[in-house]
Image (spheres, helix red, strand yellow):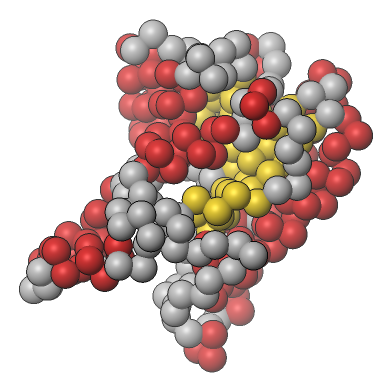
Amino acid sequence: MLLKGKVIVVSGVGPGMGQSLARIAAEEGAKVALGARSQKFLDEVAGEIRAAGGEAVARSTDVTDAGQCQALVQAALDAFGRIDGLVNTAYIHGEWTTVDRADPADWLKVLDVNCLGALRMAQAVFPTMKAQGSGAIINVSTMSTVNPFPGEGGYASGKGALNALTRHMAKDFGPHGIRVNATRMGWIGGKPVYDWIAREVAAGRDRAEVEGEITSRIPLNIIPPEEDCAKAVLFFLSDYSKVVTGASLDVNGGQYMAP
């Protein structure tokens, strides 16, 4: 099992990839602490993990509140006694608009969640990981930071700041045995994307046409399945990446290939 015996904290456990990250981490042997704003949804995911034989705690967490970030970390420590990994996947998209029409106040909200939320969570786990002399942090970013997509200026700017923060975390945390990496995600075949496709179909478009517009840009010719995307993220928590830090991994089926 890839993560046997590890304790993993996951922020942003929503209907998208966050819940897959939590479930697969548990399947791979980890004990998981789940954070998101909806306690009801968290309880459902945690209950299913326990029913499958895993161990999980769940605490409603708004990553714009440092106290709530600390409380999630403390819940993990109270339940499991240590923390080996943190996955920062909490995000908001913000307004879909071109940058000439962007509202700076909206961008500030996006930055507060997408970048500073990850900083608050990392600061919350840092003392424990430092005392252990080990740990791994993964910041989930987006392909839009390097391959611009119309309407995502605010979202990509917040995640772009997260990319820079990842490298500084890796530099500052490295002497304490803590690795920090990022994954730049492309299209993810899960509920948010398939709900969007369903809305396009309901508006009168052909499903094959809509999906074809996406897959035609991806060399693997698929919408990368959510579970496979989650596994690429979880690789950075495993001992197979013990000497990898400050890296960014593109998880997008080849749509964007870093030079």
Q: Is residue 213 above or below residue 58?
A: below
Q: How far across and down, in percent of the image, does residue 40 sit? A: 36, 32
Judge left or right: residue 45 versus residue 135.
Answer: left
Q: Nearer the viewer, residue 13 or 149?
A: 149
Q: Determine the residue positioned at 74% across, 59% down.
A: 164
Q: Can residue 63 be seen at all in this image of the molecule?
A: no
Judge left or right: residue 205 versus residue 136.
Answer: left
Q: Determine the residue positioned at 70% across, 48% down.
A: 247
Q: Nearer the viewer, residue 1 or 153?
A: 1
Q: Determine the residue positioned at 86% across, 46% down.
A: 171
Q: How far across and down, in percent of the image, does residue 4 sit? A: 56, 13
Q: How far across and down, in percent of the image, does residue 158 sit? A: 62, 64
Number of on-image labels: 0
Judge left or right: residue 60 versus residue 219.
Answer: right
Q: How far across and down, in percent of the image, does residue 59 sit? A: 52, 29
Check the picture and name the quadrant holding the C terminus: bottom right
Residue 114, by quadrant, is bottom right
